[in-house]
Amino acid sequence: MFKKIFVLLLLLSIFAKGREIIVSPDGQLSSIKKALTQANNGDVIKLKKGVYREYNIEITKSVKIIGESGVVIDGEKKGQIIHILADGVELRNFTVQNVGSDISTIYAAVRLSSCQDFFISNLVLKNFLYGFYLSQVANGTLQNNQLYGASLNDYDSGSGVHFWNVKNVKVLNNEITGSRDGIYIERSADCIIKGNHSYKNIRYGLHFMFSDGNKYVNNVFENNATGVAVMYSNKIKMINNSFKQSWGASAYGLLLKEISDAEITGNKFYKNTTGIQIEGTNRINYKGNQFERNGWALKVKGASYDNHFIKNNFINNSFELSYRGGINNNSFEQNYWSDYTGYDLDKDGFGDVPHRPVKLFSYLVNETPEAIILLRSLFIDIINFSEKVSPVFTPDNLVDSQPKMIPYK
């Protein structure tokens, strides 16, 4: 009896493997759409080298579509190109280009709707309104893809990777540039964004709202108007990311608004107008981060409580900390501050004199931006010293009582 069951299961597994369907631009079967009508669940559609001028390709079966080197699917700007509506779909190794540009319609190079268990790898997306657009999907991976948008402004362009109502999806090792937002995530949970390079996007490298329990690890956000904006979300982990070269009047490496219970660890903020701006944030641990050569390392707006800044490096920033409000409920412990002028008589590696990171001049510049022209004047040194000795505009307890004498490695 058991032997018969084993043989039956073996036969089922053989037949479930599916057929291989060959598509070639100059072959007997030259259309991807026609191949899909012939395919069954489990089949593999192999695309031979060449250009396929097709759009509105709907995938309603659990198939794999795999391209040879040199495969291009060209939508000729007529509309959406690929739409996945089935579970268990795989796409690999081809280029998708020239998506329709009607902003009133969500046209994507690859769209996924109400499906799960997908795997998309080694695609090149070019000249798109939206690159990958995912809505109501779960349990999938976008990996090793290259996205080259052609956005010129933020009002008639879309995102490179766009999530809406997504759960447990991984975005791994992708290159994203030329979009409104490199990655946009809304109402999505338990996703992992890791190893991506998001650069030269018009608005944000990464923008997410109302999305809890997500992790962002080892990404590089570079030369975007703002590196990353995190809004109205909880239980976020941001680990070992780089935020670089976000310059402009309202540019930030990282903007945090109305978030709580997060971990921001091991990140680097380099040459941004503002490293991190926080507003309405609570119970966040900032540990082991490096703030280097920013305009402001930190800007703390109102309603931010029980945040802890521990063992971070603040190196050669124009201003270390801008703080609004007369009450401080945040802690600064054992951070390195490059403009600390105290001493360490007991040689324990920490300064014997507490450090006050808020300069009076920073307060003045916030109130009157034109005052920045006085940045290097002797007068400013005098008023900063007076605020350090006798704080008037900043809370008395806004100090690091054990400033590190040398930077952390």
Image (tube, rainbow, N blue to C red):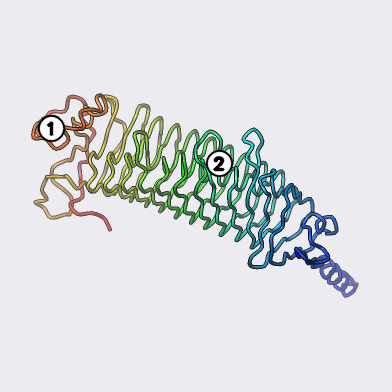
Q: Residue at x 12, y 32 (%)?
A: 380
Q: In the image, which disc is placed on residue 62?
A: none
The residue to which callout 2 is attached is 185
Asked if residue 110 is positioned above or below residue 362 in the image, the reply reads below
Mark 2: which amino acid?
Answer: Ile
Q: Secondary structure at mark 2?
A: strand
Give the residue at the far bottom of this rendering.
3
The percent coordinates of residue 394 (x first, y second) are 22, 28
Mark 1: which amino acid?
Answer: Ile
The percent coordinates of residue 87 (x first, y second) are 74, 52
How many numbered dots are placed on residues in this image? Answer: 2
Q: Residue at x 69, y 58 (%)?
A: 90
Q: Residue at x 33, y 49 (%)?
A: 289
Q: Is residue 300 left or right of residue 7?
A: left
Q: Is residue 313 left or right of residue 137?
A: left
Task: Give the camera-side residue of 405 and 373.
Answer: 373
The percent coordinates of residue 218 (x first, y second) are 44, 55
Answer yes or no: is residue 69 visible: yes
Q: In the image, which disc is placed on residue 380?
A: 1
Q: Secondary structure at mark 1?
A: helix
Answer yes or no: is residue 394 visible: no
3D distance between C-alphas at marks 1 and 2: 43 Å
Asked if residue 8 is positioned above or below residue 81 in the image, the reply reads below
Asked if residue 353 is positioned above or below residue 194 in the image, the reply reads above
The percent coordinates of residue 221 (x first, y second) are 43, 49
Task: Give the camera-side residue of 229 and 102.
Answer: 102
Residues at circles 1 and 2 in contact by the CB criterion of under 8 Å: no
Indicate the quadrant containing the N terminus: top left, top right, bottom left or bottom right. bottom right
